[in-house]
Image: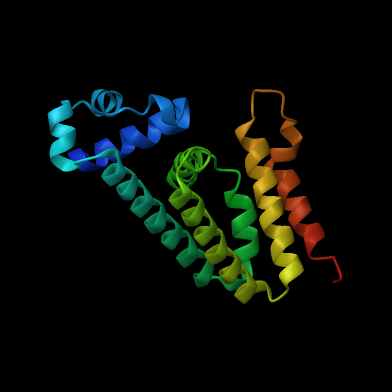
């Protein structure tokens, strides 16, 4: 039996969920408080402004990326495979948080753009340490991006075979045959 999420966690969850599902314009303090099941006063008790809430969302993304990087560092020989395969899980906490920050980056938040670039640089560095070939790392990252994009389109006309785990396994196998 788990513990109920704290009010702070519920508020950040609500902000993230609204950003992902409805975009930044609908992520008002009133909407966030309502989604989290707290009063607006309860929200402002924990977060004095939306900027503070955004900072908490950014901290969440940093923590989730750090966890992801730790998995990759623990098994460097599997880092590229892990990166590609994890791109299929569009509903993971990492991917949902990443999408929320991406929504902010699409708006007027240059700090969100900088954070996303920082995260990609960290993934690149870990993959470079594991793979040792810059072009291969770019290929792996772009492949992961494409898989994520197509997986997020499921049900909207995407080609399901492109995100079938068996297809991904065959593609990963092909990468090993490329001679750079």
Task: Inspect this view and state whether residue 36 appears.
Answer: yes
Q: Residue at x 73, y 73 (%)?
A: 133
Q: x and y percent of residue 25 in the render?
A: 42, 27
Q: x and y percent of residue 154 in the render?
A: 64, 29
Q: Quadrant of the N terminus?
A: top left
Compare residues 153 and 38 and report the one nearer the observer: 38
Compare residues 155 and 16 and report the one nearer the observer: 16
Task: Inspect this view and state whether residue 2 appears.
Answer: no
Q: Residue at x 65, y 48 (%)?
A: 145
On the picture, is 96 further left or further right than 158?
left
On the picture, is 47 further left or further right than 114?
left
Q: Residue at x 25, y 23 (%)?
A: 34
Compare residues 118 and 176 and report the one nearer the observer: 118
Q: Quadrant of residue 84?
A: bottom right
Q: How is the image coloured?
A: rainbow
Compare residues 123 and 28 and report the one nearer the observer: 28
Q: Quadrant of residue 88?
A: top right
Q: Is 72 rendered above or below residue 152?
A: below
């Amino acid at each position: 039996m788990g513990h109920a999420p704290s009010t702070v966690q519920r508020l950040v969850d609500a902000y993230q969920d609204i950003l992902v599902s409805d975009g930044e314009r609908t992520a008002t303090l009133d909407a966030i408080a309502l989604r989290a099941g707290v009063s607006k006063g309860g929200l402002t008790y924990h977060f004095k402004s939306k900027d503070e809430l955004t900072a908490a969302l950014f901290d969440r993304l940093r923590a989730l990326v750090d966890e992801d990087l730790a998995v990759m560092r623990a098994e460097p020989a599997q880092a590229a495979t892990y990166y590609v395969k994890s791109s299929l899980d569009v509903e993971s906490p990492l991917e949902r948080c990443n999408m929320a920050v991406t929504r902010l980056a699409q708006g007027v938040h240059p700090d969100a753009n900088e954070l996303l670039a920082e995260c990609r640089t960290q993934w690149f560095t870990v993959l470079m340490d594991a793979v040792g070939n810059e072009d291969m790392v770019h290929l792996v990252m772009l492949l992961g991006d494409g898989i994520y994009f197509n997986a997020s389109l499921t049900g909207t006309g995407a080609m399901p075979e492109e995100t079938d785990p068996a297809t991904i396994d065959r593609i990963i196998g092909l990468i090993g045959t490329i001679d750079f």
